[in-house]
Amino acid sequence: MKRLLKKDKGNKPTQHRTMPHLLVLRATYIDERDLSDFLVGIFGDGACTVKWKTGRFQCTLPRPLTDSERAELDATVPRHYSRY
């Protein structure tokens, strides 16, 4: 997701990229499918990554989740442990 913002002193266009957002969830490894399906439904295929690291999922997202999306995530992925 690149947007042309301005030109620098050399008249070359510079690119602006938004910083990815990291979301860490404590859940079981069997919740990966539900979590992945939920995130793909919001952001689209290939826009985010989900990695399993020591009892947690590390999700790289293009933007933070809204409050309503977090509530939907709580309903989608069972609450095995406290999250966030």
Image (tube, rainbow, N blue to C red):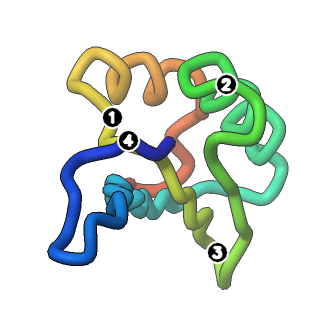
- Give the mark nearest the N terminus, 2 or 1: 2
Taking the spot 66% from the left edge, 84% from the top edge, the residue there is 54
Q: Where is residue 27 shown, x and y percent of the image?
A: 60, 55
Q: Spatial distance from mark 3 to mark 1, Cα to Cα?
A: 21 Å
Q: Nearer the viewer, mark 3 or mark 2?
A: 2
User: Neighbour class for label 3 at 10 Å: few (<14), some, many (≥20)?
Assistant: few
Where is 77 relative to 13, above or below? above
The residue that label 4 is drawn on is 3
Indicate the position of residue 61 as horizontal and vertical percent values: 49, 49
Which residue matches tag 3? 55
Specify few, some or many for label 4: CA neighbours under 10 Å numbering under 14, 14-19, or 20 or more: few
- Quadrant containing the C terminus in the rendered view: bottom left
Residue neighbourhood size for the residue with mark 1, other residues' Cα within 10 Å, grouped as few (<14), some (14–19), many (≥20)? some
Front-most of residues 27 and 15: 15
Residue for badge 2? 44
Which structural element holds mark 4?
strand
Residue 63 pos. (x, y %):
35, 42
Name the N-terminal-most of marks 4 and 1.
4
| Residue found 34% across the figure and 29% down from its top | 70
Which residue shows up at 83% across the image and 49% down it? 30
Q: Give whichever of discs 4 and 2 has the lower sequence position.
A: 4
Residue identifier under label 1: 65
Which residue: 59% across, 69% down? 56
> In this rendering, which labeled residue sits more in front, label 2 or label 1?
2
Badge 1 amino acid? Leu
Task: Check disc 4 and give the amino acid type.
Answer: Arg
Q: Determine the CA span between mark 3 and mark 2.
A: 25 Å
